Amino acid sequence: MTQSDTHLHVDSISKDFGAVRALSDIELKVERGSFVCLLGPSGCGKTTLLRIIAGFETATNGNLMLDDVDITRLQPHKRGFGMVFQSLALFPHMSVAENIAYGLKLRGAGAKERKDRVEELLNVIELPAIADRQVSALSGGQRQRVAIARALAVQPKLFLLDEPLSALDAKLRDNMQVELRQLQRKFGVTTILVTHDQTEAMVLADRLVVMKDGVIRQEGSPTDVYRNPKDTFVADFLGSANLVKGTVSSGGKLRVLGKESVLKSKAGVGTLEDLAIRAEDIQLCAPDADQNTPVGKVDFVRDLGSDLEWIVAVEGEKLRIRTSAKQGEIAQLGQQIGLKIDPEKIVQF
Amino acid sequence: MLSHFTKKHSLMFSLPALLAILPFLGACLYILRFSFSAEEATISGFSLNSYTELANAYFMRSVWVTVKLAGISTFIVMMLAIPLAFVLVTIQSPVMRRALTVIVLLPMILNLLIQAYGWIILLGPSGVLNSFLRQAGIIQRPLFLLFNEKGVLLGLVQTALPLAVFPIVSAIRAISKEQLEAASSLGASHWRIFFDITLPLLKPGLLAAGSITFAYNASAFAIPLLLGGRRVQMLGVAIRDMISPLFNWSGAAAGGVVLIAITTGVLFLASWISSRQTSKMEAG
Amino acid sequence: MRVGLLPSENGGTYRFVMLLLATLGVLVAALPVVVVVIMSFSASDMPSFPPEALSFRWYEEVIAMLTSSDASSAQSVPSSVLTSIVVASAVMVISVAACVPLAYAMARSGRSMRAGMELLFTLPLVFPLVILGIAFLLIVEGLNLDLGIWRLIIPHVALVLPFVLRNCLSAMSGVSVEIEEAAISLGASPLRAIVDVVIPLMKPGILAGLIFALIISFNEFTVTFFMYTIDVSTLPIWMYSRTVSSLNPSVLALSVFIVAADVLLIVLIDKIIAGKANLF
């Protein structure tokens, strides 16, 4: 593994709003050129953290280091970051070109230089013809891209985005996610994006930072965090996990869903342990296939087009299961069904 | 909130405006102080004379006339302002809406003199109304609608109308069409909807409009001066008379404080009733 | 629609009564002004209605007064008009210069500050004009101040502040915090962000405020009535002095000019802030 190149170091940052502690001791190292996603439910502090990085809030404790320079007290307009806001915040009284060139104008760039750079960026975002249009005449997707272009025009040290895609409809959002990723690769700029949408984070991030109640619950690559969630919150937040309890039986084995499994535990007999099983990791089979197969009753089945979503009641638990449409033949509402679960896929905490 | 915009910045930005309103505040305090002066023409000493002297028949009559005319005019204004507000809100064509807005707004900012001229021409002994009625044979001798309380009443209604219409228009936003339709579906006729739903929901706006109208009309000066002749002694005119020819400045100041007390009293009362109603609606 | 504040079909007596009262309201508001306009075209100088003959003679007389070189008395028309214009211009500039930063501060501060300021700056609106006139008069006379044209400018500013502030505040409501932060994130200092982004976006509201200030100051009568002097007098005062005894029709013609100008200005305001803000 190559030597990590820390661009931004969030050093034990805490933030209080009066009596409310919004962030507790946040410790984060962001590598140069990487795409970091701050993911969490609303109120978890992710936007507060982003705003502290941008300089629009000051931390109560802790430091912010950019390339080993302490920027904690530095005023926001001197930081040289590019930011895309949730509402996009385009300037309605300026044209597209003027919006994009605004940062350059502040830096004293001449008319020709601004014009060239605007043209360059408009080509990158694939909207070459709209330079002179008014912002109000653009579609949602176009305004999105102009906001991105405006932030990137100043060649920012950090690229900060606060839930930028939340106002777009589903199809547009999917496309923009891919485009955003490609743009980031192209420019190689260190990027931090805040979102509450787990799929979005999975698509965009090199590194995922899951937050709740002002603390970082887990950090890692998306696949890593998804496969090996550290606690039940992370497991449930990233995709729909079924949280079940396993009972420790004699011989250090775990009894799950009424049957002996191959999982082991060091805890004493009778202890309950938390387990997570993802909806797509469960397969359906005939109820009498194997004596170790858990059996349950089909409570609910729904056709989602390409997939089927089931709810099966097993040993007092209600499990959510996703299967391909092909498995539809296997059982109907109210019938008994067997569950096949790969023990490797069960997450033990 | 812009975190870098501190209280200090806030104060700095407010400074020019605070300076601009300082003379006004100073004038308020000056009046207050003068009303307690022992002398009539200058400020010296401290005495309640000016107030006790107000307890004479002349001043008391002024108070009565003022409250009466302000009250009646407020009632008439509300009867006209509510329908006007409804029409303004319901009009579809922007041209018509603009025209109506202009018509309603005009009396408020236009020169009070011009309004007075209009009323004089309309209601004077040889004016429009009288000429019309005389020619139609309805009356023999002219109706005396001017230079008495009736003329003043009309002037008050006209100049206060804009003040009432616009708060009501704002308050109408609190009513959704669906609420009215719900009442209708439950069996309410138009009048029932008006009294059971529309008016109660408009109450805060109506209280605001009514109290502002009352306060404005109670303070009227130019209208009773121009349209009342020497006969309609509303407080504004009475107070002015204390200054010239009487030079009783402390008395005028005391009278002024009484007038302010009446108007602010009404405004506070309306505001208090209104907030009790809103908290009841929010709690329930 | 069949159900509503003013139903358009099947409205019954309700609709009839509402429309009747509304029409009455319109008449009350408009009739005096309409009558003044009509009478200004009357050929005779007797206020009898309807006028037997129409003529422009009063308008000619007004124009003659306006352009006459008889500016000897400061209470002549040209001098009064000039004073009115100078006072109104000063009032416009001062009130806007005061209200724009105040509106910004109020929009970016906490609720209590904003509520307090709103209350403070609504006071001139509900304060009896006659008392205000008397109060200012007492101060100026009592303290023996020689203020010249500022005798009028200072009270007028206090009177227009509530209107101008309201317009600036509604202009500020359209400028989100994020837009300022966007400018700052691109490198603008907070002050630069205000100049480059906030003020341009406030323009319609500022313009409306300016026009309000102009109309109110130019037409102001009550307070001016107490504050004017031989040297400092406005058009409304001139009009009053000319009609204390009888109704001179040339004054009516002058009134029509003023009405026309005011209507044009109100229409202008309405157009500028159309949809973007409320008039009150």
Image (cartoon, grey):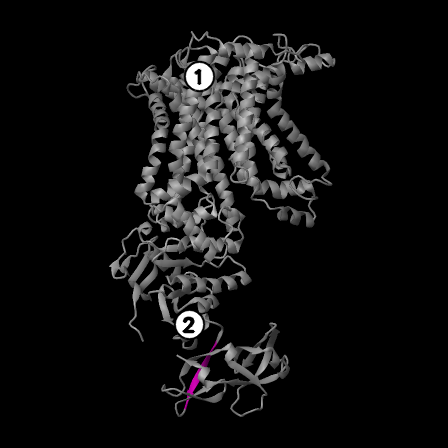
Amino acid under disc 2: Pro
As for residue A246 lying within the magenta part, the answer is yes
Q: Is residue C273 above or below residue C247?
A: below
Task: Indicate the secondary structure of the residue bearing disc 1.
Answer: helix
Judging from the image, mark 1 belongs to the subunit labelled C
Residue B243 drawn at (x, y percent):
40, 14
Our reading of the magenta stretch's main secondary structure is strand
Q: Residue at x 30, y 66 (%)?
A: A6
Left/right of residue B85 with respect to residue C202 in the rendered view: right
Task: Indicate the secondary structure of the residue bearing disc 2.
Answer: helix
Q: Which residue is mark 1?
A: C82
Depth order, front residue of B208/A334: A334
Q: Which residue is mark 2?
A: A222
Residue A10 drawn at (x, y percent):
30, 63
Task: Characterize the local packing of mark 1: few (<14), some (14-19) or many (20 or more) Cα atoms within 10 angstroms.
Answer: some
Q: Residue at x 41, y 63 (%)?
A: A186
Residue B223 drawn at (x, y percent):
52, 19
Residue C208 drawn at (x, y percent):
48, 33
Task: Characterize the local packing of mark 2: few (<14), some (14-19) or many (20 or more) Cα atoms within 10 angstroms.
Answer: many
Q: Which residues are magenta?
A: A242-249
- The image quadrant of residue B75 is top right
